[in-house]
Amino acid sequence: MTVIKTEALVLKSIPFKETSSIVQLYTKEKGKVSVIAKGARRLKSPFRGYLEPLSYVEVIYYHKPTREIQTLSKIEFIQTFFQNSTEITDTAYAMAVMECIDKFIHGHQKDERIFLLMVNVMKFMDSNRDFIKEAFIYFLLKISATLGYKTDFSTCSVCKQPLKSALYEPSTGRIICRRCADFQERVLLLRDEILDYMRILEKVDLEAGLPKFQLAKPSIDVIDFLVSYISYHLDFPVKLKSLEILANLEFNIEEK
């Protein structure tokens, strides 16, 4: 048995038995890890209040390779994101980041680049509430590239000619020009302004800020496109509950 001390982000927490919790963490040292916080739901537990999603913490836990669930020993806050937020939209996008890591990353798949990306995006979101959606689009682009599925918004994946506007084929995961499209397949239009924005985001420094995402005309949902693209390359469908809640909320607002 090894004692592990590491920074971590709390992805989710699930009640276990009468007083304990199973907590999913994404750690800097060991990647995605599940720990049991014994007695965490007791009123006087030292873990109480630390195990909510969006918490950036330092943990000490006992690691045993033969166990799927490790034992949490100690936890301390580094930062709590969106602690005082009353905006459901803000929290939904932040929770979507946690969901992505939970769904995209295998257990113990350590990658410090992913951990730092999460921390930096969460800090940016928390400090720049008017750019929450842009930060999530940025996150999807960067996590896709880090996982080895970098998108190419410059050239057609078939003929390699430069792209102005493009089409995305969900069934093949390809971004292609109109000449190479098989219109018997379902395709999504990526207009030139979408491609331009994606190209900018790929190169931007998050610390310098993000450009606002605005479309002159109705278009496909860029987040849906990026999640579809990542799903294709992961080879399983990804549905983010946080974004479904957000979509239902926006629909209800429009109905009123």
Image (cartoon, rainbow, N blue to C red):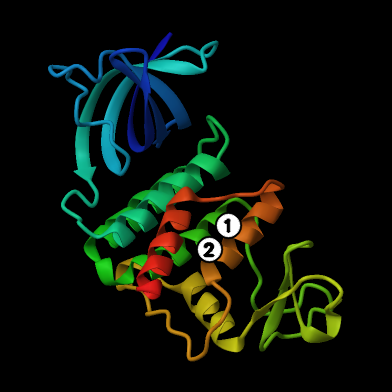
From the viewer's perspective, tell me whether residue 240 is left or right of residue 27: right
Identify the residue at image location x=31%, y=72%.
208
Asked where in the image residue 19 lies, by quadrant, the reply is: top left
Q: Residue furthest bottom?
A: 216
State left or right for residue 115 relative to residue 180: left
Instruction: State if disc 1 and disc 2 touch (CB < 8 Å).
Output: yes
- Distance from Cα at disc 2 to Cα at disc 1: 5 Å
Residue type, mark 1 in image: Ser
Residue projecting furthest to the left: 44
- Residue 210: x and y in percent read 36, 74
Does dot 1 land on a helix, a strand or a loop?
Answer: helix
Q: Using the image as rendered, state which of residue 140 and residue 221 is in the foreground.
A: 221
Residue lying at 25% horizontally and 19% vertically, measured from the top left: 40
- Classed neighbour count for the residue bearing mark 1: other residues with Cα under 10 Å, few (<14), some (14–19), many (≥20): many
Vertical order, 114 against 4 (above or below): below
Q: Locate residue 247, reporting x and y percent.
A: 45, 63
Residue 188 picture location, percent across and down: 69, 75
The residue under label 1 is 144
**Picture coordinates of residue 149 (x, y %)?**
65, 57
Report the disc number at residue 27: none
Structural crowding at the residue carrying mark 2, measured as other residues with C-alpha within 10 Å and reported as few (<14), some (14–19) or many (≥20): many
Q: Quadrant location of the C terminus?
A: bottom left
The tally of labels here is 2
* SS for dot 2: helix
**Which of 185/148 is in front?**
185
Q: Measuring 52% from the left and 55% from the top, which residue is drawn there?
A: 143
Q: Is residue 235 above or below residue 75?
A: below
Q: Amino acid at mark 2?
A: Leu
Quadrant assignment for the N terminus: top left
> Residue extending furthest top?
1
Which residue in the structure is indicated by mark 2?
Answer: 141
- Which of the 4 image quadrants contains residue 61? top left
